[in-house]
Amino acid sequence: MIIATTTSEVRGQVQKWRQAGLTIGLVPTMGYLHEGRASLVDKAVTLCDKVVVSDFVNPTQFGPNEDLETYPRDFKRDCALLEEHGCALVFHPSADEMYPDGNGKTDTYVEILDEMPRQLCGKTCPIHFRGGCTIVAKLFNIVTPDKAFFGQKDAQQLAIIRRMVRDLSYGVEIVGCPIVRETDGLAKSSRNTYLTSAEHQAALILSKSIFLGQKLVADGEKDADKIVAAMEANIKTEPLAKIDYVSAVDGITMMPVHMIGNGTLVAMAVYIGKVRLIDNFIVEE
Ligand code: AMP
């Protein structure tokens, strides 16, 4: 596995692969890999000849009060896991390599201007998706992948990236990958490591409420407000849980819906103690 820290190294390697007629998959990550993030690499390996994984904690998607400095990092462990999963090149740039003006600063952003990035998670951190789009656009320009892989766990991010690709005519196919869960149901996340064992138990209320919502839909309930209310009531039975939002939205536009239909996204963010966790499901009819 090649470890690259500069854009020119990545471009040089990609050029060689292109000349050999190979296809390239990109998996953007913020590192600290777990089986959820690694599942994207597994998928990419099945669909592309060479898989590039970016391992970069992106400063432009953190708000001023967010956990940029304390965000967990373990590049050595990431490399071992990535090699095991068949990654061909890991791109691990410094913040200055990606943002040459220093301090994670840039004056050029990619931003979707309609309501989409301001719904759901965008309500608590309005700059998050602007930073995410900007770094993904930069990675697309550096790696020029045929396909790029994103988790359904971050459903709003996935929808926003699809929209950016459409609006900016990127010639990259976006592949969404299913949520990977612990055996007890909790969606895998780097933030799970912040949970005490009591909090981990309490956090199971997220996936339990997701499964409850899915069951109501499977039983034929079409009223989105009733489903959201039942999920919220379920979450409130857990004393350590504090709801940020539970919402049913159109899976493409992220705008609220009142009737459940094919493609509806039911998403939640819930604080367990100080840790903010997300989970969701998509309705498939
Ligand atoms: P991040 O490093 O948080 O940006 O995550 C990297 C990628 O892994 C994103 O596309 C996430 O949606 C995806 N991801 C994170 N957790 C999971 C999970 N539990 N299951 C599937 N994909 C995930």
Image: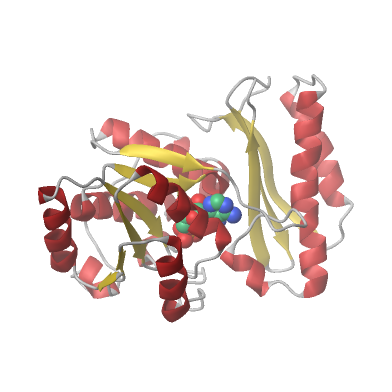
Q: Is residue 195 above or below residue 224?
A: below
Residue 32 lies, in percent from the top left, at: 49, 70
Q: Is residue 189 visible?
A: yes
Q: Nearer the viewer, residue 165 or 177?
A: 177
**Residue sitting at x 74%, y 57%:** 183
Q: What scheme was used to colour the molecule?
A: secondary structure
Tell me where residue 14 sits by quadrant: bottom left
Q: Is residue 113 visible?
A: no
Q: Is residue 273 above or below residue 123?
A: below
On the rendered structure, is 215 left or right of 270? right
Residue 86 lies, in percent from the top left, at: 39, 61
On the rendered structure, is 55 left or right of 120? left
Q: Is residue 220 above or below residue 44?
A: above
Q: Nearer the viewer, residue 278 or 119?
A: 278
Residue 279 lies, in percent from the top left, at: 65, 48
Q: How many marks?
A: 0
Tell me where residue 55 sits by quadrant: bottom left
Q: Quadrant of the N terminus?
A: bottom left
Q: Residue furthest right?
A: 237
**Residue sitting at x 64%, y 72%:** 193
Q: Nearer the viewer, residue 276 or 136?
A: 136
Q: Quadrant of the C terminus?
A: top right
